[in-house]
Amino acid sequence: MKTEGGSEAAKRRAGERAAEAVEDGMVVGLGTGSTAAYAIEAIGRAVEDGLAVRGIPTSYQSRQLAIEVGIPLTTLEEVDGVDLAIDGADQVAEGDLIKGGGAAHTREKVVDATADRFLVVADPSKLVETLERPVPVEVLPAARPVVADRVRELGGEPELRAAERKDGPVVTDNGNLVLDCAFGELDEPGELATSLSAIPGVLEHGLFVGLADAVYVGTADGVERRTYRAGK
Ligand code: 5RP
């Protein structure tokens, strides 16, 4: 359930500007999606020029791209922490996000939430006043019906994400399913996030509330940087 549209030039500007925050010696979380890919490519070019960093990918896609552009990889098991994470988003309201358009939100949240600084990269089509996209929820396959019932009890309408170019559902990098859960406008995203996290069988949901330190929005001729949380 990817967002349609959004200019490639704006995505590139956002990704490349955020990549400038990467410093020598850092452990960097590598987000997923077309906007984060511009940041990964820029980090790859910096590595080629001598920058020493280690990347922690958040998906099969970002791992493959990081290998392609020459970023040395590591894992959460091998490091003391993550200095910086750069990741995209499907919808951005102030500093709160809906992610998971690429079904990678579980690993993305682990890495993004662990990072000392989490930078979001987006084009203007992602910006909204109130989050209202269906919230992706990764579920254990065996728990799908009961999770769907609990989502309905919370006022949501769950829809199993169907694969494209494969019969049947999307299967995540972790071997699970995704329910896209429509709740309409989310006036209290933090409360919904807490309720979804409490459902047995839910691995993770795509509401990222209060996690972003800054959002880099690529515009027609530059990048607008909005700071949140600690304002880093
Ligand atoms: C993947 C994500 C992506 O970051 C999100 O879908 C944005 O992708 P794009 O930059 O291609 O629009 O959350 O699960």
Image (cartoon, rainbow, N blue to C red):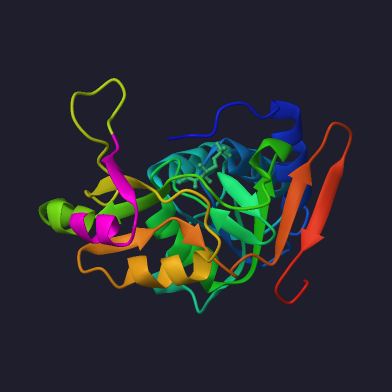
Q: Is residue 157 magenta?
A: yes
Q: Quadrant of the N terminus?
A: top left
Residue at image location 64% in from the left, 39% down from the top: 41
Q: Locate residue 166 relative to residue 42 in the image: left or right.
A: left
The residue closer to the viewer here, 65 or 200, is 200
- For the residue pair 173 and 57, the one nearer the viewer reads as 173
Residue 215 covered by magenta stretch: no
**Residue sitting at the far left:** 142
Residue that appears at 55% across and 44% down? 90
Q: Position of residue 87 (x, y in %)?
A: 59, 52
**What percent of the width, then of the height, locates residue 23?**
74, 63
Which quadrant of the view contains residue 126? top right
**Position above or below: 24 against 174:** below
| Total count of labels | 0
User: Can you name the residue that lies furthest to the right here?
Assistant: 221
Side (left or right) of 11 relative to 222 = left
Q: From the viewer's perspective, is 165 left or right of 144?
A: right
Q: Nearer the viewer, residue 37 or 205?
A: 205
Which residue is pictured at 66% across the width and 45% down the height?
39
Q: Is residue 50 visible?
A: no
Residue numbers of the magenta segment: 149-161
From where the camera sits, is residue 80 visible?
A: yes
Quadrant in the rendering for residue 139: bottom left
Q: Is residue 164 above or below residue 60?
A: above
Q: Quadrant of residue 95?
A: bottom right
Q: Position of residue 107 (x, y in %)?
A: 40, 58
| Above or below 46: residue 146 | below
Q: Is residue 49 above or below residue 27?
A: above
Question: Residue drawn at (26%, 61%), measured in percent from left and top?
Answer: 153
